[in-house]
Image: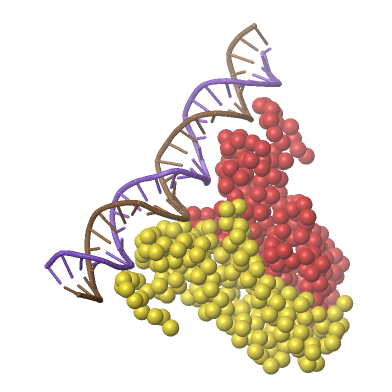
Chain colours: A yellow, B red, C brown, D purple
Amino acid sequence: MHVAPERGRRAFDPLVALNAAKEVFWRYGYEGASLTDLTTAMGINKPSLYAAFGSKQELFEKVIQAYAADDMAYARAAMEQPTAYEVAAALLHDNAIAVTRPDCPPGCLSIQGGISTGPANASVTEFLATSRLAGEALLADRFRRAVDTGDLPRDTDPAALARFLMIVTEGQAIHATAGVSRADLQASASLALLVFRSLSGAS
Amino acid sequence: MHVAPERGRRAFDPLVALNAAKEVFWRYGYEGASLTDLTTAMGINKPSLYAAFGSKQELFEKVIQAYAADDMAYARAAMEQPTAYEVAAALLHDNAIAVTRPDCPPGCLSIQGGISTGPANASVTEFLATSRLAGEALLADRFRRAVDTGDLPRDTDPAALARFLMIVTEGQAIHATAGVSRADLQASASLALLVFRSLSGAS
DNA sequence: ACATAACTGTACCGGACGGTAAAGCAAGTG
DNA sequence: CACTTGCTTTACCGTCCGGTACAGTTATGT
């Protein structure tokens, strides 16, 4: 990983710069993050940013890729738990941790980044929404397998269950941005997991 | 209600204009809504806006007040249900309806409005977060009374229960902005209500 | 009728926005 | 050593931002 630049020696590490940009987008959102905010945090000038990343929007997309690969790894790991309950428990607890990292802005970049934008940047909002729903579909697949193997009751709606859990993670993220503590979020996660005790009785 | 302006006869209805502004803020967020967007939707010019509402931020605050009074009435109504379960059921189901009104932008203005802003408008984010937590505190009070009267098990944590439910409503709002249907949100609400069946067994 | 008070429209303010052209400068190659 | 290469710096582009000065308009109080 991290190939050395072949020709012109870039005076900055693109990965370090990308991480700095991630923090700015995370804290201020796509529109709230100005090029001045970004270049200051990244320690480079605007032309360098454009040479290395293309545009503000392309930079944002690369930031989101890095975010999905690094900061959302816990979600993919959760899905490899042996049982559906453990999948959900890992997802909710690790999400409570992820949205309250002391070394990162509170909340989730996928939501903070652009839950609402002006007309000019509507594509950013759509892009993020689509990514979140794609993650939910993966979770639904995992629960569908759990139903097939008898791990979950036969009358369980895997998509509804996945949707419920994603809703909780998103609510946790919103709550985190309001300053709610990690412990309080984990208590809400434990509460949410109680639904598993009553699953076969869903109306 | 709707006192007639005493002196100069205003050429527009402030309430109609405020509602138009609400929709713009709701859809685009505080920063994403430009004065041009606002005045166009309101059908007035910038000086009229400033004469009637003071500034963009004061306009937003008045919009939020109207939103809390009108569009969030269902939340106050839910708390008057006779039992804690019915409070929660009304809150979650009516919230699913509220965030998917066909005549309004999807989601919740309190979240869409400014879940993240640039450094210049950080006060907007804080203001909204504080309002949401105030609503949660009211809900916690309602559940505390339910514990006192024996409606909820004695070992129930009313604040944690209120927090869980608010998290679900916030997640529903986020999901709604991604285009998820009202029916799907109501299914997730029913799922969330299953926690009430296992309340006295919370870990 | 007349002055007054209030709102409206136009046109503009300084500044910040996202983005870029052109010159300066450091390293790799002959 | 000149020469190329390519990033970096500086300075700037047109546009839009939130906000306002000023003059025009319109209904009221007397």
User: Residue at (54%, 71%) from the top-left corner?
Assistant: A64
Q: Percent position (x, y) of residue B124?
A: 57, 55
Q: Taking D8 as reference, is A190 above or below it?
A: below
Q: Which of D6 and A29 is in front in this view?
A: D6
Q: Which residue is drawn at 65% across and 82% down?
A: A91
> Which of the image's four quarters has the N terminus of chain A?
bottom left
Q: Residue, x 36% and y 79% (percent of image)?
A: A4
* Residue D18: percent from left, percent from top: 53, 45
> Which of the two residues, D16 or A107, is positioned nearer the viewer here?
D16
Point 50% across, 70% down: residue: A62
Q: Is residue B142 above or below residue B69?
A: below
Which picture quadrant has residue B110?
bottom right
Horizontal side of residue B135 vs B51, given as left or right: right
Residue A70 visible in the shown view = yes
Residue B59 left/right relative to D4: right
How many numbered marks appear? 0
Q: Is residue A40 visible?
A: no
Position of residue C11 relative to residue A61, above or below, is above
